[in-house]
Amino acid sequence: MGTAATLDLREHVRDLAATRTVTIPWYVWCLAAATAADFLGGYWDISWHISIGRDTFWTPAHMMVYLAGALAGIASGYAILSTTFGSSDEARDASISVWGFRGPLGCFLAAWGGFAMLTSAPFDNWWHNAYGLDVKIVSLPHSMLGLGELMIELGAMLLVCAHLNRASGAYQRKLDRLLLLVGGIQVAGSALFILESTPMEFMHNSEFYRAVAAAFPVTLIAIASVSKTRWPATTMAAIFTALFLAGLWIFPLFPAAPKLGPVYQHVTHMIPLWFPVLLIVPAFALDVVRMEMGESWGTWKSALVAGIVFIAAFVTAQWPFADFLISSGARNPVFGANYFGFFDPAGLLYNPYGFAAESHAAFARGMAVALLMSFIFCSIGMALGSWMRTVRR
Amino acid sequence: MLSASHTKPMRVLATLAITLFFFAVPVDAHVGSPNVFYDADAGPYHLFVTVNVPAVIPGVADIQIRADSDDIELVSTAVTRLAGAGSQYAPVPDIAQRSAVDPHLFTSGLWLMEYGSMRVMINVTGRRGTAQMSVPVPSAARKMLPMPPGLGALLLALAIGLALGAISIVGAAARESDLAPGAPLTTARKRRGWRAMAFMAVFVGLVFYFAFAWWNADAKNYAAITKIFKPPRLALGLVDGSRLKIRPSPDDTDWLKLKVMDTLAPDHGHLMHLFLVREPGLDRMYHLHPAQQQDGSFVDKLPSVDSGRYSVFADIVSEKGFPWTLVGTIDLPQTSGEPLAGDDSEGTAAPLIASSDTAVDTLLDGTRVIWRRNRSGLSANLPTFLRFEVQDRDGNPATDLEPYMGMAAHAEIIRSDLQVFAHIHPSGSVPMAALMMASVNTDLSAKASRLMNMSDMDMPGINMTGAKMPAMSMSPATGAAKVSQDLSMPYGFPTSGHYRIFLQFKRRNQIETAHFDALVN
């Protein structure tokens, strides 16, 4: 008893020492803040497009995205330049070399992401002039922008991982929490990118499940493989859910009116994005599977199990929930099934409260593909996660 | 009744889906003359409106509003659909800017977000109160902008930089990222880095390949849309030597899927206005009104027609107010048909030659028509009024003009190479059928209805209530419509070139056709 108490005390003292002597560098927080600003900017921008329509270079949503770019630029620029030209051997020892510059891998990725975002701007502008304004989220220039944003998020996660894998004690736990926060924001960002495939009308269609299988498992599994916490995937899914619920409940509090025509819906306030998908259920299932599998987590068999469990748990939860979302009970500010963008002819030219038609054969084929995708992306997530556990620079 | 099977469930930025829906009702106004010109009253204010329709949709329409009076304080504009869904609500109006040079001119830029039949709503506030005007605008994509070489080079350089950066970062990540801090870099590590770079180079190559494939597919889709909005081709045939059969070309499969011909709206009392113009001199013009058959095609029993190759322009308006002009050519033999009757008419002129420039046309019955042109000449892309005066054989103002198909006059404007064709009226280039739809439920319709009781002029299928016809008024004694001898038509020639204008009006129950030629710079 006495020995155990002494050990606990020693550990506690060591933790305290770690906490006192090592704090998360400001540029790590800065890069993490960039991912948060980027998500907020993205959510706000889509809401702006469906509520107001007309935008300028200076809309607050765009400003948030610029802020994200600026924060990422400052964080990665400082880390790379101070490591390259500074005198800290510790920083140089924990760096990689690209084109003569030295710095953390995460910062190089974030810098690359920032350049990709910058490159997408003139490309997107020309695209609008040639083919019209933003007619869809998933266009080539938007994908380039999204890739840049993804690299900033991945850079932030790798930067945190590098510190986490070199840390111990309370400092490690603090970094672990930050990693889950950035991972949750990344999951939410992925949800924005698949928005066109995930309206409630699609929730009984295979396309919906294919989109979910492509968007979420990689980050959930990769970060869960790195994190030392008990419920990492569940935590990230909870962060995603909280962010989307906050958007759903807060955005409509602000007045807005369409500035583009034609207008199909009478819009008087900011239109939020829809109720979050029930990702928390398969995320919880993945955490349970990971704990049950123990050391065999990361093998192709575990990826197969994770892929099946992810889809099965998600379908089990989302399918009946879709029935509720499409019912009159969800047409309220809590579930938001009554919100439609100003240009959406819902209720005028189509019935938004009915599931899109898909033949049984097409659905079966589509779900088989969704299952295969789930397996593949779970495998990628495991491979990424096992590599991220080794990243130290 | 709505049903789930008809859903187009793209709720976020679903313009593309909406666009596809509206393929059921798109149009191209005239041929090679996409802009809209409209001259009318908005309550007590007289306005001349020009809508420069963008070539790319969504895109910004440049709107110019010129007021006759100087008592206007504020002009605002907004876009809605012409009719049905999307016509009920208007967005926050755009405040038009008053020109610093010309206080009568207001300009506004409005986004046209969708293809199809749109309505520009104009609100005017001035010392005589507030009034509204609705202008139908056909919104259609016409072309795809090429990539400017400078921008293309910049993007290529940036893309190559990003590709090299990605390859280098992946190489460095494989080489060093999982090394303990301070650990030395071994040869094996360096090899691992090179292998990763080689793998990444292949991966980047694949990304470029698929990105360009995606880009090409999108560009192809957009090109297909612009193709749909090109004037549809006609299939023309002569039956029994004198009956002209008119139908859309069966080769124009994409356009046929729109089923435009199934539900047409009558314009000036006719479902189709057919114009036959003899090539190459534009020296014969027939304005006919064929009847639709059970199978959807149109048939016209031709009058006596001089032989030759004819360019054919068939104006129709869809039930949603979208004007299309179908085009084709046919070689006609000398035909001996029945005399022209009803609203059918013809025009004869000397062949159009490069030096043709006409300001006065004297018709066979002695009627003189004078085109009062600006001394500064005609310029392309400059909205103006084509002003004509009709005189009797003695040179006195003709006081016996009558409405011709509900209008004071009609004009067909044709460029010498037949690549531009427009059919306009004193109110402008807007089809009457669309105008009727646009004015529904606006203050304008009620006010205009009170000012001008046009119910006597109703034509089959058209409710003319609420439309004020420029250059026309009512006789207080008889209640009959009177037409001024001064005819004025708003128009802007779209391009430079040599043009022929056929001006048609009715006098003493006789349809007259004058012609004028002009060079547009």
Image (spheres, coloured by chain):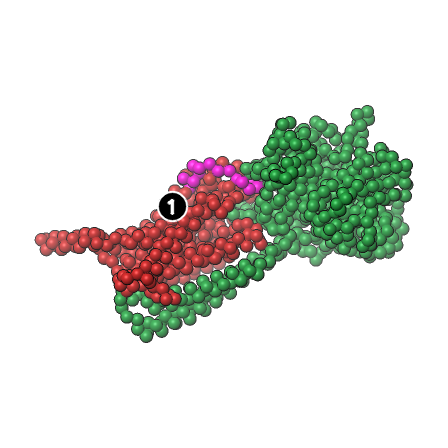
Query: In which chain is the residue bearing label 1?
Result: A
Identified at 16% across, 53% down, the residue is A13
Residue lying farthest to the left in this orientation: A2
Whether residue B165 is visible, yes or no, is yes
- The residue shown at (70%, 35%) is B40
Q: Nearer the viewer, residue B405 or A41?
A: A41
Residue B121 visible in the current orientation: no
Q: Residue B197: where, in percent of width, then height? A: 40, 69
Determine the image quadrant of residue A343: top right
Asked if the stretch drawn in magenta spans residue A211, the answer is: no
Closer to the camera in the image, A56 or A174 = A56
Q: How many marks?
A: 1
Residue denoted by label 1:
A243
x and y percentages locating residue A158 in the rendered image = 34, 59
> SS for tag 1?
helix
Residue B52 in the image: state x and y as whole percent: 65, 45
The one of B63 and A191 positioned closer to us in this rendering: B63
Identify the residue shown where x is 39% and y is 64%.
B169
**Chain A: drawing colour:** red
Q: Colour of chain B?
A: green
Q: What stretch of residues is rendered in magenta?
A: A248-264
**Residues packed near mark 1 inside 10 Å, few (<14), some (14 to 19) or many (20 plus):** some
Name the outermost residue toward the bottom. B187
**Hey, what amino acid is under mark 1?**
Leu
